[in-house]
Amino acid sequence: KQGEMVALVTGTGGNTFFGRTAKLVGEAGAVSHFQKAVMRIGDFLIFVAVGLSIILIAVELHRGEPVLELIQFVLILVIASIPVAMPAVLSVTMALGALSLSKEKAIVSRLQAIEEMAGVDILCSDKTGTLTKNELTLGEPVLFGAKDAEALILAGALASRPEDKDAIDMSVINGLKDRSLLDKYNQTKFIPFDPVGKRTEGTVTGPDGQTSKYTKGAPQVILDLCDVDGETRTRAEKVVNDLAAKGYRTLGVAGSRADGGWHYLGILPLFDPPRDDSAETIAQAKQHGLKVHMITGDNVAIASEISGQLGMGTRIQAATELFKSNVDPTHLSPEAAQKVENADGFAQVFPEHKYGIVKAFQDRGHLVAMTGDGVNDAPALKQADIGIAVSGATDAARAAAALILTAPGLSVIIKAIEEARQIFERMMSYTIYRIAMTIDIMFFVVLAVLSFDFTPLTAVMIIILALLDDIPIMTIAYDNTRIDPKPVRWQMSRVLSVSSVLGLLAVAETFGLLLIGWEWLKNPEWQQWIEIDKPHIQTMLFLQLVAGGHLMLFLTRTKKLFFIPPFPSPALFWAIVGTQIFAVLMCALGWLVPRLPWSLIGLVWAYNIVWMFIQDVVKVGVYYLIEDRPMHKQRYLKTVNQSLHTHGY
């Protein structure tokens, strides 16, 4: 641990190992798909709102409407139609999701990571401490000169010093069935392990007063120390190789002889066993469409054995073969990238290799989560779509990560992904609902003006409608949703297809009520039953939009028929019920809107319920066309596997 040496400086600053790490951290960083999705949705709705507003202004100016009143109305209409609350609703949904994840011992440091986590299909996991217990355990001893297994373990323990708390020493000592045996020996001298000698040595006085020495260390070193015949050496080397192929590290153990030489006693296998929950967790990951790849600095044989035990496959790729010294980790050849994708895990991995592995997966269209704990893992954690700092990670790793675990193991990550997919479903249902409502309001108002020269909603109604639509929607963050069995992403074609169909159906629904009201004005028999005028029609349309909009939310929250579980959460259900009661009382009592008879309120509600069933059946049909038919399903899955990095969302 001290001394002097002559060294040759081959690089400084950015050309050093740590300098390259810092440079990679600066270059790394994945794009937020959530922000791009919100921008694309916002652009689409603004385009629709502004385009229809221009048509409305042109028609009304041609008809001689007052310019100032027209501009005021159009501005209110556009502001109410554009989903200004969308970022707030989605952010609140993710924030509450982050709170929920914290209860699962996963701290979110970047809010958008929740949405990206829902789409992760590749998880690159460290072996030690995540897949395994990070606790060396003694295997079945292999005897050579020792009389029995306990005697061999005792010899190894006497070549250890318990107070050092060394992991290897403690694994040997803990392997004793009777630790009180150590109390019978007095250790008078101890030579600790050093990288040159590669062994430890203890001098002890036994219960009989005799002094003896014991040593343990690298099997080859201990073999060379002892005077063994060729047959013993061959057998020992075979045992070491066989154990290495099964994932074991090995220690050779020897004891001193009376003549001062060493007697080869045997071999102690050591291994870091898989965590009790790892195999089950990996099986769950597969059910969720998640491929787990092991990443370890161990050799290929050890990695292959552990990977096979956990059901992860045995196609282990040595990172040193993929990333030659002259290969840029950010630009792998297509052949090397294909090897990365086909591998079940990676062995002999250095920290800079992790960055290249993540980049290779991303370039082939995957969303990647990567675990890490050290300073050198920071570039890979930052480049990954979801960088995960495992329990006990350094501050640098935590700073680069999007998710920080406070408990060891993979099960925390799987729970976080399940929670993220539920959060994603909530955001998706709100997004489809909001786009459909914007289409409904804008197209209907313009259509009513063009068809009947009639303003169907007053400016006050539009403002109240916007408030009643968005305020209770905040509770969607608490909604019950199903957990999708596969990774989910923002598929804009699907979102716009479903929302556009529902929006146009809503336009037909609202315009149909206008046609009924218009016919009512001209029908003497209907007027005798209930006399109405144009302000009454405006109130009916206002109530229809308030009720129909929230009934539509019950449809968008599931791909199945709305009355099939999971049912809405109490928070969402009662928030909507409260909003509807308020809207009904407004119309019945004439608050800020022309008063409407109870019979017409009941008629509007009955009309909405009938249309709700029609829209629901059509919605299920649309999902069937774009997802469930074999041909469409193949196209959809192909789209899912395409790179969001390439397509920008």
Image: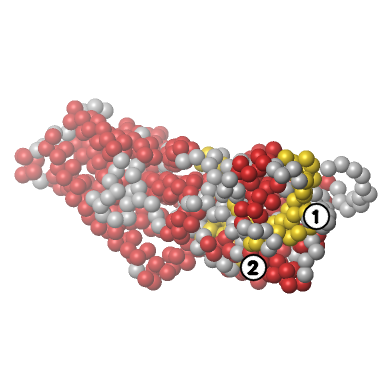
* Secondary structure of the residue carrying numbered label 1: loop
Q: Nearer the viewer, residue 640 or 332?
A: 332
Q: Position of residue 65 (x, y in %)?
A: 35, 39
Q: Nearer the viewer, residue 209 or 455?
A: 209
> Image height check: is 417 above or below 68?
below
Q: Position of residue 357 (x, y in %)?
A: 64, 59
Look at the image and tell me whether residue 200 can be seen. no
User: 10 Å neighbourhood of mark 2: few (<14), some, or many (≥20)?
Assistant: few
Residue at 32% in and 52% down: 558
Tell me the quadrant of the picture where the N terminus can be found: top right
Q: CA distance from mark 2 to mark 1?
A: 33 Å
- Rendered image coloring scheme: secondary structure
In which image quadrant can residue 486 be found? bottom left
Residue bearing mark 2: 242
In which image quadrant can residue 497 be found? bottom left
**Circle count:** 2
The kind of residue on which mark 2 rests is Asp
Q: Position of residue 125 (x, y in %)?
A: 58, 54
Look at the image and tell me whether residue 605 can be seen. yes
User: 10 Å neighbourhood of mark 1: few (<14), some, or many (≥20)?
Assistant: few
Residue bearing mark 1: 258
Left or right: where does residue 600 sit relative to residue 252?
left
Q: Position of residue 482 (x, y in %)?
A: 35, 51
Pair 2/1: label in front = 1
Residue at the far front: name it. 208
The kind of residue on which mark 1 rests is Ala
Say if mark 2 contacts mark 1, CB within 8 Å. Answer: no
Residue at 25% in and 52% down: 564
